[in-house]
């Protein structure tokens, strides 16, 4: 939980992701990784050597403007208040995804990771700017891409905004869905939807990772729901062919 609290303490409003990038990479010190950053600021990581890779993705930015954040742990709930005790957002959308991917990079021998900047809509600027600007070549040897960027604790988005088919529901072993209480649902727009719109051919999805009231001052995380999401994604990476 301490690592997660440190993630929440770093503001990464769209266009200001440098601090969270640096902190994320610090957590991977000592791992043998190939790391690239493109001209737009997206980060691409490869661990291990394989003919093909499972892939995971999250975004580095958040919607909240910089403010004082005092992280509060109330039982299973994590949120933040400012110096006056007023609730402020923690950027769990999508620092929860970053936390999960940090853990996976320490445990999985073979993995590809895409971390996108500027996913969030910012004023009049449309969202998913990083994923709309990147080269798709990184995914040439990726079998599928699991995004960890969804509210709640029980949803796998397989159809994105605009009726964009991300993957077939049958991709997910029913016994794994039932074990963790997940179900396939339609959802909104995120980086994997933008990638599919651009012609990415591999199966994608977006998975709930334990945050609630995203984009609002009373945003919070249920830590056991985040831990469940980590276990779910970890098992999917082992079970999906």
Image (cartoon, helix red, strand yellow):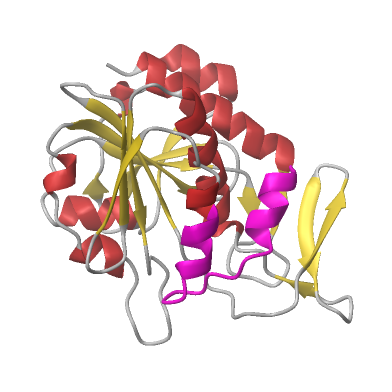
On screen, residue 120 versus residue 76, left or right, reads: left
Depth check: 109 or 201 in front?
109
- Vertical order, 217 against 178 (above or below): below
Left or right of residue 218: residue 156? left
Disc tally is 0
Task: Estimate the x, y position of residue 141 in percent, counting from the top left.
Answer: 15, 32
- Residue 9: say if magenta: yes
The quadrant of the picture occupied by the N terminus is top right
Figure check: 50 above or below 17: above
Front one among 31 and 146: 31
Q: Residue at x 53, y 69 (%)?
A: 12
Q: Residue at x 72, y 41 (%)?
A: 223
Q: What's drawn in magenta, residue-wise?
A: 1-23
Q: Nearer the viewer, residue 47 or 199?
A: 47
Q: Name the residue rendered at 74%, 46% in the picture.
A: 2
- Asked whether the viewer can see residue 29, the reply is yes
Name the spot of residue 124 as percent of width and height, x first.
36, 87
17 drawn magenta? yes
Is any part of residue 150 visible from this angle? no
**Percent position (x, y) of residue 201?**
12, 40
Quadrant, the C terminus? top left
């Amino acid at each position: 939980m301490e690592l997660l609290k440190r993630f929440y303490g770093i503001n990464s409003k769209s266009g200001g992701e440098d601090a969270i990038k640096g902190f994320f990479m610090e957590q991977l010190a000592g791992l043998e990784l190939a790391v690239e950053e493109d001209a737009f600021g997206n980060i691409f990581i490869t661990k291990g050597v394989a003919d093909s890779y499972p892939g995971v993705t999250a975004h580095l930015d958040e919607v909240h403007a910089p403010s004082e954040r005092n992280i509060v742990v109330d039982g299973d709930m994590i949120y933040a208040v400012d110096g006056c005790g007023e609730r402020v957002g923690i950027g769990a959308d999508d620092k929860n995804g970053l936390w999960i991917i940090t853990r996976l990079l320490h445990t999985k021998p073979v993995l590809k990771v895409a971390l996108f900047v500027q996913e969030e809509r910012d004023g009049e600027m449309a969202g998913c700017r990083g994923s709309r600007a990147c080269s798709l070549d990184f995914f040439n040897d990726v079998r599928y891409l699991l995004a960890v960027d969804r509210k709640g604790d029980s949803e796998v988005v397989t159809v994105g905004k605009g009726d964009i088919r991300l993957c077939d529901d049958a991709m997910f072993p029913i016994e794994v869905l039932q074990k963790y209480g997940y179900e396939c649902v339609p959802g909104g727009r995120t980086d994997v939807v933008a990638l599919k719109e651009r012609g990415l051919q591999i199966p994608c999805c977006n998975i709930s990772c334990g945050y609630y009231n995203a984009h609002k001052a009373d945003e919070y995380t249920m830590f056991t729901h985040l831990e469940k999401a980590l276990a779910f994604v970890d098992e999917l990476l082992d079970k999906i062919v």
